[in-house]
């Protein structure tokens, strides 16, 4: 019986007859030969149909197949040095499973808005295949890294009654006649976990109610948020850079084919595995921006132009340390050397991709944190549990959050952040 395989396993079946379930992405014919571009979700390769080797019915079917038709392909695997994938299939038989007519995403160029509106189909393209393969590898490597470092995975709630990042960006919902919000961050819950287990991390969706259409913002995205007890900021920064270098190396080691499909130069990525990453203070960053003629002053937050300029001055990700209090959340530790700023850091990705990590050492004193919550205009009752962490065995602790889509966009060198998340605009289907 002919063995069923996936395209990615072709290398293990050279000169063997196999059967593959696949879709047609494109085709061309030249006289008595038809070339079928095939995909099965694991990889892409070419099927060669020679009129001399198949029945008239099979050859006729091969020439009439339409884009995204599904089929069973039976044939013999051969090496193909002309393709990056390295293998092709000499087709002996085709069994049509599902026909496809007027597929909307043709091989011609389409605009990003059109493609996002057809996201459920755009996922089938080579580009999206490559991005999702790299996304999958980065998630796998994330779990591997933190497991190897002794962290425990925790799952914070998605519906919450408190706001770690400020109330203006909350999605409100009704929770059995009470107000609840879609989570902005799992950090506060991760802090509770760190007080129980020492080192924890979360990986899940978070939401920001920002009406932004920039290439750098999403309303729904995934965050990886580690939290570490008995840990000061300097130790946290070392974990952050090791983690990012680990992600880049994992992609280099395991995603050469997707990187090739995207045209991403591995030699550029290799530079980002070298440690340590450079560091500058927020004050130094302001000086650099002012020297470049930018209209910024101490106390301003950085937008895309400022972050791009700063990152362009370095060949690696760069940490910007110790921001003013007025532009950061309430839970951070006050800098003992400057009470106007926090002990915190953002990591800016190279090549103009902006902030991919934000982190800080957390405030450990009960009274100081309580005053910060009140100053932020938040309801103390909703943060009573969070204040408890400072009453019962408070310890120095630090943590950070990596925005998965931002990191993917940088590593893949994408033009648009929304390419990095599988279904960023499917909510548009929910029309009244």
Image (tube, rainbow, N blue to C red):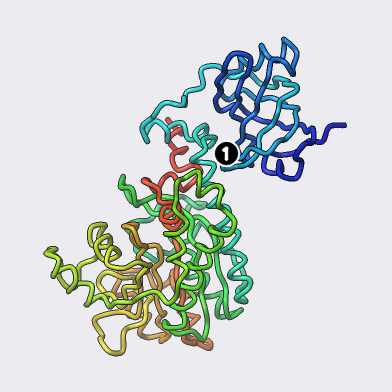
Instruction: Give the labeled residue for mark 1.
Output: 83
Estimate how packed mark 1 is, as few (under 14), some (14 to 19) or many (20 or more) residues with alpha carbons within 10 Å. few
Q: Residue at x 68, y 39 (%)?
A: 79
Front residue of 335 and 283: 283
Q: Is residue 305 above or below residue 273?
A: above
| Image quadrant assignment for residue 318 | bottom left
Q: Is residue 226 above or below residue 432?
A: below
Q: Is residue 114 left or right of residue 301?
A: right
| Image quadrant assignment for residue 350 | bottom left
The answer to whether any part of residue 277 appears in the image is: yes
The answer to whether any part of residue 180 appears in the image is: no
Q: How many marks?
A: 1
Front residue of 23 and 385: 23
Q: Could you tell me which secondary element the residue under label 1 belongs to?
A: loop
**Farthest front residue in view:** 81
Q: Is residue 67 left or right of residue 370?
A: right
User: Which quarter of the rendered picture does the C terminus lie within?
Assistant: top left
Front residue of 145 and 46: 46
Where is residue 236? Give x, y as percent: 46, 78
Q: Is residue 51 left or right of residue 223?
A: right
Where is residue 139? Give x, y as percent: 57, 58
User: Which quarter of the rendered picture does the N terminus lie within?
Assistant: top right
Q: Is residue 302 left or right of residue 356?
A: left
Q: Residue at x 77, y 36 (%)?
A: 15
Q: Residue at x 41, y 66 (%)?
A: 357
Where is residue 177? Give x, y as percent: 48, 52
Where is residue 110? Give x, y as percent: 39, 29
Q: Is residue 126 above or below residue 227?
A: above
């Amino acid at each position: 019986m002919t063995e069923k395989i996936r395209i990615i396993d072709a290398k293990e079946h050279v000169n063997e007859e196999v059967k593959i379930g696949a879709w047609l992405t494109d085709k061309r014919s030249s006289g008595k030969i038809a070339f079928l571009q095939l995909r099965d979700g694991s990889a892409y390769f070419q099927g060669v149909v020679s009129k001399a080797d198949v029945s008239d019915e099979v050859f006729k079917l091969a020439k009439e197949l339409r884009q995204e038709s599904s089929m069973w392909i039976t044939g013999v695997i051969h090496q193909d040095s002309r393709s990056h994938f390295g293998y092709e299939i000499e087709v002996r038989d085709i069994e049509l499973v599902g026909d496809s007519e007027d597929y909307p995403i043709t091989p011609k160029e389409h605009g990003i808005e059109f493609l996002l509106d057809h996201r459920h189909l755009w996922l089938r393209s080579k580009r999206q295949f490559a991005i999702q393969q790299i996304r999958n590898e980065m998630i796998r490597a994330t779990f591997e890294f933190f497991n190897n470092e002794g962290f425990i995975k925790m799952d914070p709630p998605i519906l919450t009654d408190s706001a770690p990042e400020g109330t203006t960006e909350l999605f409100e919902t009704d929770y059995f006649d009470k107000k609840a919000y879609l989570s902005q961050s799992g950090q506060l819950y991760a802090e509770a976990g760190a007080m129980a287990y020492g080192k924890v991390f979360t990986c899940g969706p978070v939401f920001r109610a920002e009406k932004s259409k920039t290439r750098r913002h999403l309303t729904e995205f995934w965050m990886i948020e580690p939290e570490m007890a008995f840990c000061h900021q300097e130790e946290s920064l070392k974990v952050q850079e090791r983690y990012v270098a680990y992600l880049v190396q994992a992609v280099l080691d395991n995603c050469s084919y997707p990187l090739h499909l995207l045209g991403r130069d591995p030699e550029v990525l290799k530079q980002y595995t070298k440690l340590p990453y450079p560091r500058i203070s927020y004050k130094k960053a302001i000086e650099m921006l002012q020297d470049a003629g930018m209209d910024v002053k101490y106390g301003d937050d950085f937008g895309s132009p400022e972050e791009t300029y700063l990152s362009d001055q370095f060949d690696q990700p760069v940490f910007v340390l110790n921001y003013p209090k007025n532009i950061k959340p309430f839970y951070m530790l006050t800098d003992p050397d400057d009470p106007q700023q926090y002990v915190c850091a953002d990591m800016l990705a190279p090549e103009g991709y902006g902030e991919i990590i934000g982190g800080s050492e957390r405030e450990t004193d009960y009274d100081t944190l309580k005053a910060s919550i009140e100053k932020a205009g938040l309801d103390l009752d909703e943060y009573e549990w969070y204040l408890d962490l400072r009453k019962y065995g408070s310890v120095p602790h630090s943590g950070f959050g990596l925005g998965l889509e931002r990191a993917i966009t940088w590593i893949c060198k994408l033009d648009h952040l929304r390419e990095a998340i599988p279904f960023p605009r499917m909510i548009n289907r929910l029309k009244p």
